[in-house]
C-alpha cells in the first residue's frame, strides 16, 4: 500500500475506532494531553496557521511534515474523543490532565495571556457599545 493510502486509511480509522468494543474516549483525550502540553499545542497550531502562506526562505521550519501530520492525527483523535465523551454523557472532570498542569507555559506566561484576553474583552465591549 502506498504512503498516500496508508495516511488516508489512518484518517478513516479515527472515525471507525469509536465502534471498537471497549473504546474509551477518555483514553484518546488523556493520551493527547500526555503528549502535548499547552505550550506545545499552541506552538503546533500557530505553526500550522502561519505555514499556510509558506515558510519564508530565511526561516528554518520548526516542525517537519511528518511531525505536523502526526500532530493533526493526534488532534483528530482528541476531537473525536471529546465528541464521543459528550455523546455518551461522560463526566469530563474525571480526565487525568497531569501534563497540562505541568505545562511549559509558566505562571508568568499564563498571567500575561489572561491580561491580553482581558484587554481584548474590554476593546470588544467598547466596540459593541459604540455600535
Image (cartoon, rainbow, N blue to C red):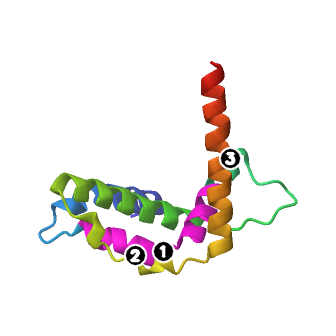
Task: Please name whichever residue, 2 or 48, is drawn nearer the observer in this view of the structure.
Answer: 48
Q: Which residue does the image show at 62% across and 18% down from the upper left?
A: 131
Q: Which residue does the image show at 52% across and 81% down from the upper left?
A: 102
Task: Please name whichever residue, 92 or 80, is drawn nearer the observer in this view of the structure.
Answer: 92
Q: Mark 2 or mark 3, which has the lower sequence index?
A: 2
Instruction: Give the image location of residue 34, x and y in percent.
Output: 44, 78
Task: Please name whichever residue, 5 or 39, is drawn nearer the observer in this view of the structure.
Answer: 39
Residue pointed to by mark 2: 97
Q: Can see residue 84?
A: yes
Q: Mark 3 or mark 1, which has the lower sequence index?
A: 1
Instruction: Give the image location of residue 113, x and y in percent.
Output: 64, 59
Please state which of the two labelled residues, at mark 3 or mark 1, is closer to the viewer: 3
Measure the C-alpha gap from mark 2 to mark 1: 5 Å
Q: Which residue does the image show at 49% across and 77% down from the upper left?
A: 101
- Name the outermost residue toward the top: 131
CB atoms of marks 2 and 1 within 8 Å: yes
Q: Magenta residues?
A: 25-46
Q: Is residue 22 left or right of residue 49?
A: left
- Residue 80, compared with residue 121, is above or below; it is below
10 Å neighbourhood of mark 1: few (<14), some, or many (≥20)?
Answer: some
Residue pointed to by mark 1: 100
Q: Is residue 22 left or right of residue 44?
A: left
- Name the outermost residue toward the right: 58
- Residue 96, compared with residue 116, is above or below; it is below
Query: Dot 1 lies on which element?
Result: helix
Amino acid at each position: 500500500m502506498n504512503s498516500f493510502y496508508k495516511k488516508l486509511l489512518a484518517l478513516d480509522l479515527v472515525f471507525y475506532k469509536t465502534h471498537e468494543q471497549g473504546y474509551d474516549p477518555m483514553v484518546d483525550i488523556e493520551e493527547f494531553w500526555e503528549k502535548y502540553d499547552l505550550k506545545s499545542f499552541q506552538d503546533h497550531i500557530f505553526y500550522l496557521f502561519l505555514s499556510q502562506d509558506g515558510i519564508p526562505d530565511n526561516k528554518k521550519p520548526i516542525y517537519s511534515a511528518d511531525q505536523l501530520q502526526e500532530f493533526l492525527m493526534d488532534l483528530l483523535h482528541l476531537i473525536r474523543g471529546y465528541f464521543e465523551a459528550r455523546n455518551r454523557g461522560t463526566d469530563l472532570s474525571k480526565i487525568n490532565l497531569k501534563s497540562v498542569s505541568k505545562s511549559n507555559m509558566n505562571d508568568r506566561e499564563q498571567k500575561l495571556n489572561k491580561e491580553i484576553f482581558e484587554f481584548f474583552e474590554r476593546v470588544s465591549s467598547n466596540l459593541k457599545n459604540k455600535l
